[in-house]
């Protein structure tokens, strides 16, 4: 090992980018989630809320880290499940990391899990074509090798020619094989396939959605959110997907040490298992968490908001018809709530902000004759359709002794 290589590894160890076990290239990855970095949202009244990233890359396609790094990042971020979805056809590192088995990244990632880890590693891959087909992720595949053209020449190696040769296998054949394996398939960063940078529903995607071969569509990828993709999801009954699509370190791209986070799916499941996640994805039980925006259909988003927010009465200010209440936030979202109740907040504007995992005290002018108080808010950091914010109602009981 040269002096420069030792210096790089020493620097990464000191900054925490890799652990000692990774530097030695053996063993499992580091610790489970600790500190404020973990992404946290409560369970709803009827379902478990799992935090999932379904689109990541490693050095086994065009990513820049080993699969075990993806596992350690997922543990630090408090994810419940992750898929490492290598490109089948775009393989710029193939000459340096030969791997005829396209399941290898998943196998390495799974083997790097700590023995006591509850993280679910989902097998997946990325079908990569030029427009109009674009990129599509297939997760819960049984054998990624069967989703791309076999026997592509690799000598002399040219990644562009390899991509072109692999792309000669029809995209439809890849989707047909994914369906035969029971995979969940979604359309990736669709806005990047067109010169307008706006998603357009093609006949290929429309036909496969109708035939049950295309199940979802990314509405958030990396640092981009697409309102057009959101509307297409609503129009064609596609599951809403939000992903990191990370190629570098999560720490570099999303800066969790500065309060940032990767985009993820909140998946609402009946149980904490791979099958439970797949079933929930197929049923469309997801909300996307992108920057400070929660995006979902009403049926999924409202139960989450009701779990995230609560209100409790603290009693009336002595001698005045002003009720003090506590508004609590049990999630990582920074809620921005517009008052729609027709009631006057005496110490706040009509837009109230509640920081993550914190409480806000409100003073509300209301008669003492009431036995309960209901506040209705428009949730400005959430969407149920492009440009449409959901509304939530919160009720606080007023104890009889206080109301008298």
Image (cartoon, grey):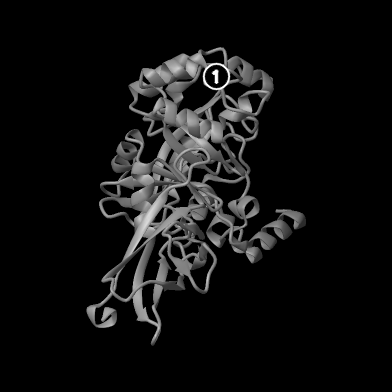
- As helix, strand or loop, the secondary structure at mark 1 comes to loop
Residue 400 vs residue 125, the one in the foreground = 400
Q: Looking at the image, is 182 positioned above or below residue 355?
A: above
Residue 98 percent across, percent down from the top left: 58, 31
For the point 28% across and 78% down, the residue is 403
Q: Looking at the image, is 119 positioned above or below residue 32?
A: above
In terms of image quadrants, where is residue 130? top right
Residue ranking furthest to the bottom: 318
| Quadrant of the rendering where the C terminus is positioned | bottom left
Residue ranking furthest to the right: 4
Q: Looking at the image, is 248 positioned above or below residue 18?
A: above
Q: Is residue 56 visible?
A: yes
Residue 7 vs residue 251, the one in the foreground = 251
Q: Is residue 137 visible?
A: no
For the point 53% across and 41% down, the residue is 387
Q: Looking at the image, is 344 positioned above or below residue 197?
A: below
Left/right placement of residue 210 relative to residue 136 reads left
Residue 64 percent across, percent down from the top left: 63, 43
Residue 376 percent across, percent down from the top left: 39, 57
Left/right placement of residue 99 relative to residue 194 reads left
Number of marks present in the image shown: 1
Residue 20 percent across, percent down from the top left: 56, 61
For the point 57% across and 21% down, the residue is 129
In terms of image quadrants, where is residue 59? top right
Residue highlighted by disc 1: 133
Residue 51 vs residue 399, the one in the foreground = 399
Q: Residues within 10 Å of mark 1 (few under 14, many from 20)?
A: some
Residue ranking furthest to the left: 400
Residue 115 vs residue 366, the one in the foreground = 366
């Amino acid at each position: 090992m040269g002096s420069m290589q030792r210096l790089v590894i020493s620097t990464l160890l000191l900054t925490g980018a890799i652990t000692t076990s990774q530097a030695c290239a053996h063993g499992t990855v580091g610790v489970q989630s600790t500190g404020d970095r973990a992404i946290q949202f409560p369970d709803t009244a009827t379902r478990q809320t799992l935090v999932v990233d379904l689109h990541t890359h490693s050095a086994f396609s065009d990513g820049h880290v080993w699969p075990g790094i993806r596992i350690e990042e997922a543990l630090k971020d408090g994810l419940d499940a992750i898929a490492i979805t290598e490109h089948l056809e775009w393989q710029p590192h193939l000459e340096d990391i030969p791997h005829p088995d396209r399941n290898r990244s998943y196998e390495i990632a799974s083997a790097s899990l700590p023995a006591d880890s509850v993280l679910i590693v989902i097998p997946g891959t990325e079908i990569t074509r030029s427009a109009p087909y674009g990129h599509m992720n297939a997760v819960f595949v049984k054998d990624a090798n069967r989703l791309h053209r076999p026997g592509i020449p690799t000598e002399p190696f040219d990644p562009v020619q390899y991509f072109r040769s692999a792309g000669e296998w029809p995209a439809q054949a890849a989707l047909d094989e994914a369906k035969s394996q029971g995979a969940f398939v979604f359309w990736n960063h669709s806005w990047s396939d067109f010169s307008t940078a706006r998603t357009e529903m093609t006949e290929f995607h429309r036909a496969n959605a109708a035939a049950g071969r295309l199940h979802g569509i990314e509405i958030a990828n990396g640092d981009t959110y697409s309102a057009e993709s959101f509307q297409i999801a609503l129009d064609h009954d596609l599951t809403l997907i939000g992903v990191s699509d990370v190629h570098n370190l999560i720490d570099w791209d999303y800066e969790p040490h500065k309060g940032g986070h990767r985009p993820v799916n909140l998946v609402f499941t009946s149980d904490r298992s791979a099958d439970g996640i797949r079933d929930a994805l197929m049923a469309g039980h997801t909300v996307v968490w992108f920057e400070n925006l929660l995006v979902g259909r009403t049926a999924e988003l409202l139960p989450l908001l009701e779990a995230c927010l609560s209100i409790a009465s603290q009693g009336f200010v002595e001698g005045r018809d002003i009720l003090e209440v506590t508004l609590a936030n049990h999630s990582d979202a920074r809620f921005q709530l517009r008052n729609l109740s027709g009631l006057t907040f005496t110490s706040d504007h009509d837009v109230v902000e509640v920081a993550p995992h914190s409480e806000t005290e409100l003073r509300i002018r209301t008669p003492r004759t009431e036995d309960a108080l209901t506040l209705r808010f428009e949730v400005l950091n959430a969407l149920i359709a492009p440009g449409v914010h959901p509304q939530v109602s919160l009720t606080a009981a007023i104890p009889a002794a206080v109301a008298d």
